[in-house]
Amino acid sequence: MLVAVRIRWRAMRRRGHVWLRSHPRAYALLHSTGSLHGSPEAIARGVAVGLLIGLTPTVGIQTVLMIALCVLVAGNFPAAFAMSWVSNPLTLAPMVWAFHELGEMLLSPWASLLARGDVWYLRGAGDDILCTAAGSLAVAIPAAIAGYFIAHVLSQRWHSRRLRRLRSQGSIDSDV
């Protein structure tokens, strides 16, 4: 199981590196704003950004949104890119359907209020978009918050273990 996770993680990292190499302006922007740092805080922010964008139906503009948010919050873009694959072509359709159903359930108490005023009521595709957006945000925001805290704890542990291993090998001074 752990080997499969490592292989999957490496494949996603490779995809991210390939994408960054083919987009030098994006790389320069991310590098200058600190969005490529590997600190536990930056990784946790990147995971939160990736989950927030990956769990919304923003297909086609996900990478642009992730770059903008990573620059804004100084999150690790490779971590965001890897986490955004939670919505891949195989899972997107069921996720959007589930988001829409959740949104309808959340907005149904408000439907009678919205139906009274024609100004606020969106008929046809508009209410479907509204329900899908509400449902996706109801899932994405808590997932991003939980992902931030989980990623922060895990990356801190990983960094401390790596530091201990390097110290025991004599690769770095124990004063660091």
Image: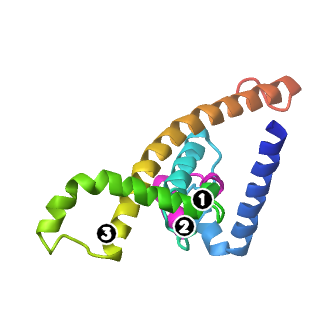
Query: Which residue corresponds to mark 2?
Result: 62
- Mark in the foreground, 2 or 1: 1
Query: 10 Å neighbourhood of mark 3: few (<14), some, or many (≥20)?
Result: some
Element marked by disc 1 = loop
Residue 69, can we see it? no
Mark 3 or mark 1: name the one nearer the start of the chain.
1
Q: Residue 116 in the image: x percent, y percent?
A: 11, 67
The residue lying toward the viewer, choosing from 138 and 123, is 123
Q: Residue 57 in the image: x percent, y percent?
A: 49, 65
In the drawing, does residue 131 fall left or right of residue 52? left
> Given contact means CB atoms under 8 Å apart, are the residues at marks 2 and 1 in contact?
yes
The residue lying furthest to the right in this view is 169
Which of the 4 image quarters holds residue 99? bottom left
Which colouring convention does the figure follow? Answer: rainbow
Three-letter code, disc 1: Ser
Three-letter code, disc 2: Gln
Q: In which quarter of the image is the N terminus?
A: top right
Who's the residue at 48% across and 56% down the image?
98
Region rendered in magenta = 64-83
- Mark in the foreground, 3 or 2: 3
In the drawing, does residue 22 fall left or right of residue 36? right
Query: Which residue corresponds to mark 1?
Result: 87
Q: Does the magenta stretch include residue 78?
A: yes
Q: Residue 80 in the image: x percent, y percent?
A: 59, 54
Who's the residue at 27% across and 75% down the image?
123
Element marked by disc 2 = helix
Who's the residue at 75% across and 63% down the image?
15
Q: Quadrant of the C terminus?
A: top right
The residue lying toward the viewer, choosing from 86 and 53, is 86
Mark 2 or mark 1: name the one nearer the start of the chain.
2
Q: Does the magenta stretch include residue 163?
A: no
Query: Which residue corresponds to mark 3?
Result: 127
